[in-house]
Amino acid sequence: MLLLIFAAVMGVPLLVAIFYEGPAARAAGAVISQAAWHQEIRAFSIAIGVSAAAGFVLRVLSRGARAKEITVREGFAVVGIAWAALAAVGALPFYFSGQPGFETYTNCYFESISGLTTTGSSILANIEILPNGLLFWRSFTHWIGGMGIVVLAVAIFPALGIGGYQLYRAEVSGTTKEKLTPRITETAKILWGVYVLFTIVLTLLLLPKMSLFDALCQTFGCLATGGFSTKNLSIAAFNSVYVDVVIMVFTFLAGINFTLHYQALRGNLRSLLQDSQTRFFTGSVLLAIVLVTVSTWLTTPMPKEGRPVTEAVRAEQAKVATLPGALHRSAFEVVTTHSACGFVTADYDLWPNFCRVLLVLLMFMGGCAGSTSGGLKSIRILLLLKMARREIDKMIRPRAVLPVKLAGQAVDESVLQNVGALFILWLMIFAVATIVMTWFVPNIETALSAVACTMGGVGPGLAGVGPMQNFNGVATPGKWILSACMLLGRLEIYSIIMLMFRKTWRR
């Protein structure tokens, strides 16, 4: 079913290609050649055909299968396998397009999984040479993956005839999965309704400073906290304080639990303002902005050791030479990094090491549970800090009963164990992946930040994969490892780890 849905979804960028680059568009001045346009149409047609055919064949083969209820293991299996499969199909338009950068299927899969997992890491050195259909598809994969292709399927196809809550549980990130209504399909529709509303509002706000096409693509990347842009310089290419502020505000909102947005839109603003996770997330954002602003303002950005002071370095120095300039750039980078978006307006790889390390830590933290953001999620960081505080208190008062509380309520010990176990797994996978990546990249800084930004769903890292670089220089095995990191990070590890145990597949 998901493959059939995906085939229909790919029809949208096909229509965009026809509208912006077809014969009528070329007559009006579109720059794409007829041969390139035909190649693009062919690429999308093949991808749609493959996805539809695969979905149809699997539907026929599974006609005899009936299930009254999807259990936990089926829910996680469907989600884990679906993301990998949809990324494989989503890579086909890139692969058959013949565009520079997409010569190998590895590159195409990397770009596709990066889009669907809303990571935003790219192998492209020159984004602006791509035709509009492919540019739209890159950004549209963000928008689809932002709220979740599986939630979308459950919302639109209740006729599946099977329980959908396990799919929603596997897809929606965080320690809790709030159901706004008794029926999960209605919950999914509500979440997508809020998502679409935000999409429309942000697109309208961006229209005064950019075309409808660019506004839509930046909106997709912003609300999905993905980071794919239509420009090589990302948001910096628009050179507008207005655009920077609007993007920053909506990126911050996208990093907050969408159920709280729904409640706020219904008039219950108190639930948003009093939410412990939202307050912790907001506080960490503000603290990071202050620290990075002061650091960049007082410490002049410098080139890397052994490199000359280039025009790019001088330009970066000028951006943060004044307090307003430092605040502007620092606030944008902190918000987009903490929310796991990855849009950039400055080359933060030239900033002081304090700022660079802090940004990597923000990649780990991510936004709130129930948002489109990646990372460990603020709720888990908050619980880990409370657990650490409790252990210190226990040393002082060994016999005291000290429950960990959140919003005045005691948190179940099983939830705390889950949080602790996930944190340990996260660190173990990060360490192992970083060690392995040192074989495929030139230095430890690149390896560490590449794993951090892909697991955190941020996009750009530091050094060789910094904001003004790309991932094309990573060796082929390294790209597959980072693709796995994206999948693990987006589905929060357990969904994928479960599939590797024999017990999962036993009857």
Image (spheres, helix red, strand yellow):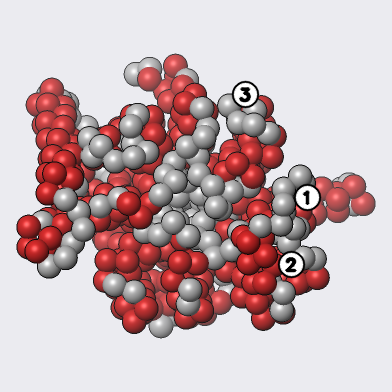
For label 3, the residue is 439
Quadrant of the rendered structure where residue 6 is?
A: top left
Say what amino acid the circle numbered 1 marks: Ala
Direction from residue 64 to residue 321 in the image, left or right: right
Asked if marks 3 and 2 touch (Cβ < 8 Å), the reply is no
Quadrant of the rendered structure where residue 275 is?
A: bottom right
Q: Of residues 38 and 183, which is closer to you in this image?
A: 38
Q: Of residues 379 and 361, which is closer to you in this image?
A: 361
| Mark 3 vs 1, N-terminal side | 1
Say what amino acid the circle numbered 3 marks: Trp
Q: Secondary structure at mark 2?
A: helix
The 10 Å Cα crowd at callout 3, few under 14, some 14 to 19, many 20 or more, is some
| Mark 3 vs 2, N-terminal side | 2
Say what amino acid the circle numbered 2 marks: Thr
For label 1, the residue is 388
Quadrant of the rendered structure where residue 66 is?
A: top left
Q: Secondary structure at mark 1?
A: helix
In the rendered image, residue 416, in percent from the top left (x then y), is placed at 64, 46
Quadrant for the N terminus in the image: top left
In the rendered image, residue 279, in percent from the top left (x then y), is placed at 62, 70
Q: Of residues 386 and 59, which is closer to you in this image?
A: 59
Asked if marks 3 and 1 touch (Cβ < 8 Å), the reply is no
For label 2, the residue is 296
In the rendered image, residue 97, in percent from the top left (x then y), is placed at 23, 39
